[in-house]
Amino acid sequence: MNLGNDKALWLLFVVPAVLLPVYIWCFWQKSRALKILASIDMLKKINRSVSIKKQIAKSLILIVAFICIVTALTEPKWNPRPQKIKRRGRDIVILLDTSRSMLAEDIKPNRLERAKIAITDLMETLAGDRLAIVTFAGNSAVKCPLTQDYAFVRMALADISTESTTRGGTLIGDAIRKATEEVFDNQSREFKDIILITDGDDHDSFPVDAAQKASQAGIRIIAIGLGDDDAGSRIPVTGPNGEKTFLKYEGQEVWSKVNSDMLRQVVYATNGGKYMSVKPGTTLDLGQIYEKLIATAQKRELESVTMMQYDEKFQIFIALGIILIISESFISERRKT
């Protein structure tokens, strides 16, 4: 037997902890009240017509009915049958910029945290697609390979920060090449997407060339630029005593701007590529982007998953509990005369 909600079993502790003490206390109070209201001779006459055994039986019936209802709440199932489920979807690799400029707070709470929240929301709308995460700054790292285990992806995402990569800078081209060569498989030249989330310029990693090679492998790039490409935003730095300052270079505060022109060249180098700008005051909704651009695109058969299917049997215990409750009301407390 399989239980769909085994946490409901904790309710069974109500029987020894509450129901039995309550019934015992009620019997004792009833006996005490009768001794006050009636004499001993009168109590003997009353007790001749009352069956203590039937009173106890009625109480036990109600307790058993409660146990049946709790059992129904555990969602019992049996008769397991293996069932093979075929999944269709696309392979999606998220390239997430983890450079220090992603700490800019023009997009609340900051660019990196907003991107992580959007990725978490995206997983709520995925329909069987495989997902991977690659972080990049001065170098690139595969934080999660292609998988349909979204719980594992969430765990990997939670650990991502600006410390996820060991070198500073922004090398978008290297990240695209890592995804193309190390993350995607070579089984098909289609059904592959890269979602590039970044806020910065590129430091001579030739991202357009990398995008052209990705396109030859059947990969489409959807780029999302976080921040303003005109004014930009300062990068906060927290000192050892908790004081907040801003990152400086050669005595001047650094302002992070999005290189929209370069990102457009990257996406246009791939077939069907798309660039989207998320400026301060706007919302990054990856779920909506997925619905418009990825969910409607062609999908391929992914690996089949064998799952056990059970017959729901909670109805039996609900019916038994109701029958016991009704039966208890028809049982008399009187002795047969």
Image: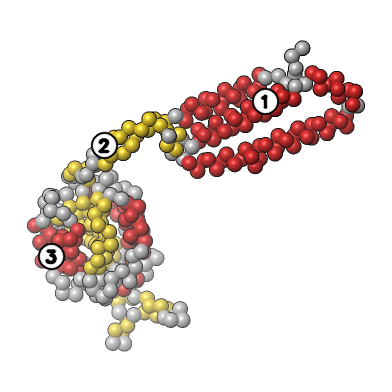
The quarter of the displayed image where residue 332 is located: top right
Nearer to us of marks 3 and 1 is 1
Q: Quadrant of residue 144?
A: bottom left
Q: Residue furthest bottom?
A: 251
As helix, strand or loop, the secondary structure at mark 2 comes to strand
Residue 224 place in picture, x, y as percent: 25, 61
The amino acid at mark 1 is Ala
As drawn, the label of residue 210 is 3
At a point 19% along the width and 75% down the height, the residue shown is: 203
Give the number of the disc on residue 84.
2
Query: Where residue 279 appears, x then y in whole percent?
Result: 30, 64
Q: Nearer the viewer, residue 34 or 169?
A: 34
Provide residue 261's location: percent of width, then percent of height.
Answer: 17, 67
Q: Classify 120 as above or below 279.
A: above
* Quadrant in which the C terminus appears: top right
Observer-side mark, 3 or 2, equals 2
Q: Is residue 167 above or below residue 76?
A: below
Residues tagged 3 and 1 counted as in contact (Cβ below 8 A): no
The percent coordinates of residue 266 (x first, y second) are 15, 63
- Measure how far apart labels 3 and 1 are at the Cα level: 80 Å
Examine the rendered structure and indicate whether residue 74 appears above or below residue 99.
above
Q: Are marks 3 and 2 in contact (CB under 8 Å)?
A: no
Left-right relation of 95 to 162: left
Disc 2: CA contacts within 10 A as few (<14), some (14-19) or many (>=20): few
Q: Amino acid at mark 2?
A: Lys
Residue placed furthest toward the top: 337
Find disc 1 in the rendering and name its residue: 57
